[in-house]
């Protein structure tokens, strides 16, 4: 095969792979919507009745969450679910997080606090709280998240009605939307993350629960050894561990959780790099298990991760060749006149907007008309987020390959963006 042919194939793959995946996700999500969400016809504040209300333990790992923890714990204590406790873990915070938690615990019997003297990492915090929990169902949320009043009820419904359900991931909604990055992420969590999780439920396996809001069956966690302490993304790792042991992982769009996201490029880069590195680490850790016929339903998730990583290197190659070509004369096979080829670029852009439109229609029941305000901003998504994601994947692969197994993953205070009060 000639160099010209290889380069041509790489260029085609770079632009048609996201086109193909967009229609794959849209098809699966539309099927999920009509045969699951629409059939239920229940409002978020009107969850289905439960034959029983087993005890729930809310787990809140915290590190430097002083500005957010009161609001987070307060939302948990206001849950409509009748039978629960809250276990908060103060992981060696450098601010007033520990003091605030202790003050709240003195006023509320349903709240218990665990303190770590040294930074142990989110996975260890989750482990400690899970072992200390009094109940079988564990709902884990981040220390800056606000759980909807009826979210616990929606999550518990799956465990009560599905004995093989090991985990249920909720529906994160971005609440800080005062900047361009915030507005794009509000649309992303609807059109990309929510759409993909719906489709993955139809196609077989979910790539990951949402680390910010997910419920677990404690006996399932015991079977797989809880969360590994050396993985930078404990949520991806536990999702794969459960499904490789034949536990079902589900998505519940009615379990809303309002979260803060990075609104600076530095914070966004750190987040996407961690996500990309975590995916590769999990693939390396579980690769041998994936080769068995018993775990064939995980193959599509594995293939998508591998191909997506290859796509990232391809798109970086295309951008690099185009950039070099602006200053130097390259051989004809490498000459790139434009980053997006004419009609293909229009087709890809139109497909992205169609994907966003479908997701906004599906998710309109959860945020009414508010999401429509961000449709305009989503035109920037391919340019901004694909570039960041591609670069992050390229950096993440060697980082994951070089990482020494067993090295503890500890907390690093993330960029929480601007508070909602600052919105226009």
Image (tube, rainbow, N blue to C red):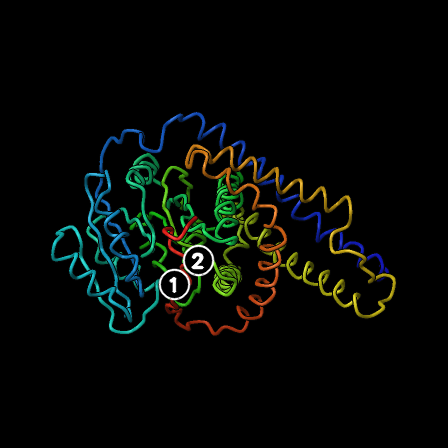
Q: Kindly identify the residue that appears in the image at 76 percent across and 68 percent down.
A: 324
Q: Nearer the viewer, residue 81 or 54?
A: 81
Horizontal arrangement in the rendering, residue 198 relative to residue 258 (left or right): right
Q: Kindly identify the residue that appears in the image at 49 percent across and 33 percent down.
A: 362
Residue 285 visible at all: no
Q: Is residue 144 above or below residue 403?
A: above
Q: Nearer the viewer, residue 50 or 176?
A: 176
Q: Secondary structure at mark 1?
A: loop
The picture places residue 238, in percent across and down from the top left corner, at 40, 55
Crowd tier of the residue under label 1, counting other residues whose Cα lies within 10 Å: few below 14, some 14–19, many 20 or above = many
Q: Nearer the viewer, residue 150 or 350?
A: 350
Q: Residue furthest front?
A: 424
Of labels 2 and 1, earlier in sequence is 1
Residue 266 visible at all: yes
Name the residue tied to disc 1.
228
* Residue 55 occupies quadrant: top left
The picture places residue 247, in percent across and down from the top left corner, at 40, 46
Q: Quadrant of the N terminus?
A: bottom right
Q: Is residue 368 above or below residue 258?
A: above
The picture places residue 152, in percent across and down from the top left corner, at 29, 41
The picture places residue 371, in percent across and down from the top left corner, at 48, 39
Q: Secondary structure at mark 2?
A: helix
Name the residue tied to disc 2.
237
Residue 154 has which mark?
none
Are the residues flagged by discs 2 and 1 in contact, CB closer than 8 Å?
A: yes
CA distance separating discs 2 and 1: 7 Å
């Amino acid at each position: 095969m000639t160099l010209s042919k290889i380069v041509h194939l790489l260029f085609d793959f770079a632009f048609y792979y996201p086109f193909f995946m967009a229609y794959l996700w849209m098809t699966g999500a539309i099927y999920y919507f009509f045969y699951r969400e629409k059939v239920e016809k229940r409002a978020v504040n009107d969850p289905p009745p439960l034959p029983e209300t087993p005890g729930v333990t809310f787990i809140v790992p915290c590190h430097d969450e002083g500005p957010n923890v009161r609001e987070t714990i307060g939302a948990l204590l206001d849950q409509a679910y009748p039978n629960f406790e809250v276990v908060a873990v103060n992981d060696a915070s450098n601010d007033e997080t520990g003091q605030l938690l202790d003050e709240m615990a003195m006023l509320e019997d349903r709240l218990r606090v665990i303190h770590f003297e040294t930074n142990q990492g989110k996975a260890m915090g989750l482990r400690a709280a899970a072992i200390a929990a009094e109940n079988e169902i564990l709902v884990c949320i981040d220390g800056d998240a606000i759980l909807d009043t009826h979210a616990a009820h929606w999550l518990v419904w799956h465990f009560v009605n599905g004995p093989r359900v090991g985990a249920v991931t909720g529906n994160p909604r971005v609440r800080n939307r005062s900047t361009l990055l915030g507005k794009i992420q509000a649309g992303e969590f609807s059109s990309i993350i929510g759409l993909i999780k719906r489709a993955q439920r139809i196609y077989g396996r979910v790539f990951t629960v949402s680390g910010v809001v997910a419920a677990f069956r404690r006996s399932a966690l015991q079977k797989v050894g809880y969360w590994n302490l050396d993985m930078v993304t404990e949520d991806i790792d536990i999702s794969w561990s459960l499904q490789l042991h034949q536990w079902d992982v589900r998505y519940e769009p009615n379990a809303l959780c309002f979260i803060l996201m990075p609104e600076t490029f530095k914070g966004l880069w750190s987040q996407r790099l961690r996500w990309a590195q975590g995916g590769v680490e999990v693939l390396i850790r579980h690769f041998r298990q994936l080769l068995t016929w018993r775990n064939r339903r995980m193959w599509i998730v594995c293939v998508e991760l591998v191909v997506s990583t290859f796509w990232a290197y391809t798109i970086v190659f295309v951008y690099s060749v185009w950039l070099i070509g602006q200053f130097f004369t390259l051989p004809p096979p490498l000459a790139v006149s434009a980053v997006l080829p004419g009609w293909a670029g229009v087709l890809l852009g139109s497909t992205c907007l169609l994907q966003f439109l479908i997701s906004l229609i599906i998710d309109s029941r959860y945020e009414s008309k508010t999401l429509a305000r961000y449709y305009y901003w989503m035109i920037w998504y391919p340019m901004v987020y694909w570039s960041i994601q591609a670069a992050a994947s390229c950096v993440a692969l060697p980082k994951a390959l070089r990482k020494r197994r067993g090295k503890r993953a500890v907390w690093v205070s993330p960029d929480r963006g601007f508070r909602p009060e600052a919105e226009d």
